[in-house]
Amino acid sequence: MTTMLPLRLVINAGPCEEVVARCLASVRAQRYPAWTATVTIDPAGDRTFERAVDAADGDPRLSIVRNAQRQYSMANLIAGISRARAGPEDVIVVLDGDDWLYSDTALDTIAAAYVRHDCWMTYGSWISNDPSHQGIQRGLWPAYDDDTVDFRHAEWRHTAVRTWKRWLWDRIDDRDFRDARGEYFRVTEDQASMLPMLEMSGTGRARHIPEVLMVYNRMTPHACGKTHLAEMRANADLLRARRPYARLEGHATRSG
C-alpha cells in the first residue's frame, strides 16, 4: 500500500464572513484524502469565525481558532504552521480564507507534482472571480525561466497556490519575516516566505503548476492591495534589498 504525501493546509482569514464557508467547503470537497487544515481567524468585528465553525460542521480534519487580537498575515502564517504539526517532509499548502480551491482535484494536482518531480516547493496558478477579468490571463503566468537566479528582481511569478516542504521553511531566518521595525510583516508575507525558499531551491526544485488550482477573490473590499497598498510597496522594496539565500547544496547558508 502506497503512503500518501501529507498535505497540511494553513488557512488564515480576516473579515470574510460572506465567503469563508465557500473556502472551507472547497477544502472538504477534495478527493485527495491525506490532508488536514489549520484555520486562524483574525477578529474584525464580523461573523467570520462563526461562519467558519458552521462550515466545518465538526470535521476533525479542520482545526479552527480565533485570535484575541489581530495578528496579521505573517504572524498567523508562522503560528498556523506551528499548529499544523507538520513533519519535515509534509507539504504546507497556503490558502487565504477569502479564496477557494478551483476544483475537487486541486490537492491531487499538488501532491502529484511532488511525487512526479521530486520538488521542494510549488507555485501557481489561479483565476479571478472578478467578472471584468474574464478572458484576461490573470494568475495564469508561466514558470520562472530555468536560468533565473535573481528572484528578488525578476518578474514576480511565485503566486498562489503556494506550497513547500516543511523542512525548507524551517531554514528561513526569523529576521527575514520581519519589517524595518523588527515586527512581523502585516502584509507581503508571500514574498517574505517565498523568496528565500525560491533562492534555496532554484528552478530545479521549485515547480510551477500550470493547472488552475484556486479562485482568487478579487471582489473583496478587504484585499491588502486595497487597504495597505503603501505598506505592501514599502515591504517589497525592503525585501528586494535584502541579501539572497544561497542555493541549497545539502545545507542552507546565507550568501555574502
Image: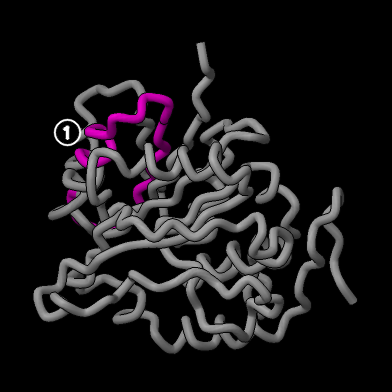
- Residue 7 image offset from top left, x and y in percent: 47, 35
Residue located at (38% from left, 31% from top): 63
Is residue 47 shown left or right of residue 90? left
Residue farthest along the left direction in this orientation: 131
Residue 150: quadrant of the picture:
bottom right
Residue 211: quadrant of the picture:
bottom left
Is residue 176 shown left or right of residue 121? right
Residue located at (76% from left, 74% from top): 244
Compared to residue 147, the image places residue 210 above or below, namely above
Compared to residue 133, the image places residue 115 above or below, namely above
Residue located at (85% from left, 54% from top): 249
Is residue 165 shown left or right of residue 10? right
Task: Locate the C terminus and report the quarter of the image it occupies.
Answer: bottom right
- Residue 20 image offset from top left, x and y in percent: 21, 49
Is residue 165 shown left or right of residue 124? right
Compared to residue 236, the image places residue 43 above or below, namely above
Range of magenta residues = 25-47
Residue type, numbered disc 1: Asp
What residue is pinned by disc 1? Answer: 54
Q: In terms of depth relative to the viewer, which is nearer, 211 or 76?
A: 211
Residue located at (69% from left, 43% from top): 167
- Crowding at dot 1, Cα within 10 Å, few <14 / some 14-19 / many 20+, comes out as few
- Say if residue 54 shows up in the picture: yes
Secondary structure state at the residue bearing disc 1: helix
- Say if residue 43 shows up in the picture: no
Residue farthest along the right direction in this orientation: 256
- Residue 53 image offset from top left, x and y in percent: 23, 34
